[in-house]
Image: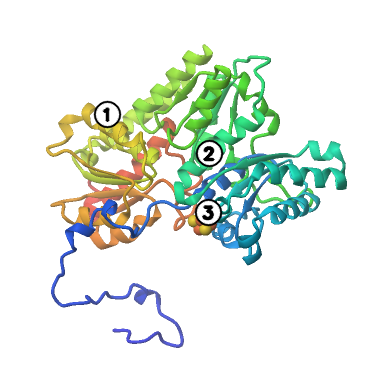
Amino acid sequence: MKLTEIPVDGIPYDHLRIEKIPVTPAFAPRDPELLPASSRVLVVNPDRICMPIGAMWAVLGIHRAIPFVQGAQGCTTYARYTFSRIFKEPATIATASFHEDAAVFGGRMNLVEGLRNLVVRYWPEVIGVVTTCSSEIMGDDMTSFIGEARMKLQAEIGPERTEQIAIVPINTPSFAGSHVEGYDRAAKAFVQSLATDRDAPTNRVNIIPGLFYPGDIREIKHILQEMGIESTVLFDISDTLDAPLEPPQSIPYYPPGGTHVAEIKGMANAAATFALQLDAGGSGARYLERKFGVPAVVGPVPVGVVATDTLLQNLGKATGCATSPALRAERGRLVDAMADTFHHTMMKRVAVFGDPDYVSGITRFVCELGMTPVAVSAGTESKNFAAAVETVFSEYQSLFLDPPKVFNGSDLFEFEEYLKTLPRLDLIIGNSKGVDIARELEVPIVRAGFPIYDRFGYQKRPIVGYRGAELFLYEIANAVLDHRYPDDRTQQL
Ligand code: SF4
């Protein structure tokens, strides 16, 4: 049945995918000059979103914290919508609600009044003030605005209660970077504002996980627990953006989890800081090292055998704690799963895209599986990315006839057009933004990275650590099986 118009009783499920009609009967090749994202002033199908959202993600991982967005309502609404789509949870985010008058006179009154209203209605313990394009272009002086807001609060609720509220400014001009840098700036801003003294060194470690999901953070905590290491996980979203559904114990409601302010204050006393993602959180770790001498261990992204081994070794060196029999068994199970599946993963040609740290971590893992990465793309331009993936390629040279194509700071239009030129592609690994590319190329996609909004439960399933890699491997292997073998063949495997 051909649908010429949408019927009044709706479109039946079997017609939801509408047949594409080419604009011209002949194939019109793309203008090669317009293919590289670097030669265009236009981004087509971007693989990154705006900087404040990374900072909001971070603030939502603090206990009783609310991000306050110094900008227009749209800068907040789309972030809340994005978080709801990914985590299927409400995200409380306040806004300064800029209108024309703020664009003319600046956002001072919006911030002062807005913080006051937020405090007397929600009584947060922490407010992360996240700037936006408009407030940065206007040049809002956040330090003096926050000082004025504090004075107003002191007059209304008293100095003692005002003192109990931490207000952390995070500068996130979106035109200067993406969500990855937003998270990174938040990590630095929080330790800079709150971790101010190294007065009682401990054997605890700091973990800055980066833009990993609740399932990944739980897996990291499991590793730490197995090794008997006490830790502070900065921006622990595992129990704020994946909280159990229970009747609220009090109004206003705050989920039970998140990093406590006291823990962040103690981060300067830690034995080491582990930033698991280089581009998202590394600045916080390096700040603590420069300022207080807390050793920073930045990366590698702990996906797969080698990177997880490295994390465990580094944790052991920093704390003197040994790995446990349970972790060794998990490692053994992962290696066993790799042996069980290698004849399906070996030499499969895979394209990986997403945030730079996700891509470099996953690229190493697929090489461990004997797969051949043919193209890797970081949607956010990164100083670390090219070196990270080139290191992996040099370690696994035997997998490649031709060097894989590396895109750094590209868009998915350029990535897709390149994939179309390849003689064969078996799998794509990336976030939900690549689903249409996978359909177009008739190649399976395994979802990983930020954001995943078209599946349930992905925020709970880890890809880090030995257990996470094992689950991830099964998804990869099963996607290959689904695509390459008819059902009656898979029963004989
Ligand atoms: S890009 Fe700028 S204006 Fe647009 S939502 Fe982000 S901060 Fe707001």
**Ligand 1 under 8 Å from disc 2 Cβ:** no
**Which quadrant: the C terminus?**
top left
Q: Which mark is residue 185?
A: 2
Which element is circle 3 on?
Answer: helix
Mark 3 close to ligand 1, CB under 8 Å: yes
Residue 65 x %, y %: 68, 43
Label 2 crowding class (10 Å Cα cut-off): few <14, some 14-19, many 20+? many
Q: Which comes sooner in the sequence, label 3 or label 1?
A: 3
Residue located 35% across and 58% down the image: 43
Identify residue for label 1: 391
Which mark's residue is nearer the viewer, 2 or 3? 3
Label 1 CB, ligand 1: below 8 Å? no
| Residue type (three-letter) at the residue carrying disc 3 | Cys
Left or right of 186, for residue 32: left
Q: Is label 2 in a helix, a strand or a loop?
A: helix
Between 73 and 447, which is closer to the camera in this rendering? 73
Helix, strand or loop status at disc 1? helix
**Labelled pair 3, 1 in contact (Cβ < 8 Å):** no
In the rendered structure, find residue 133 and report the number of the disc placed on it. Answer: 3
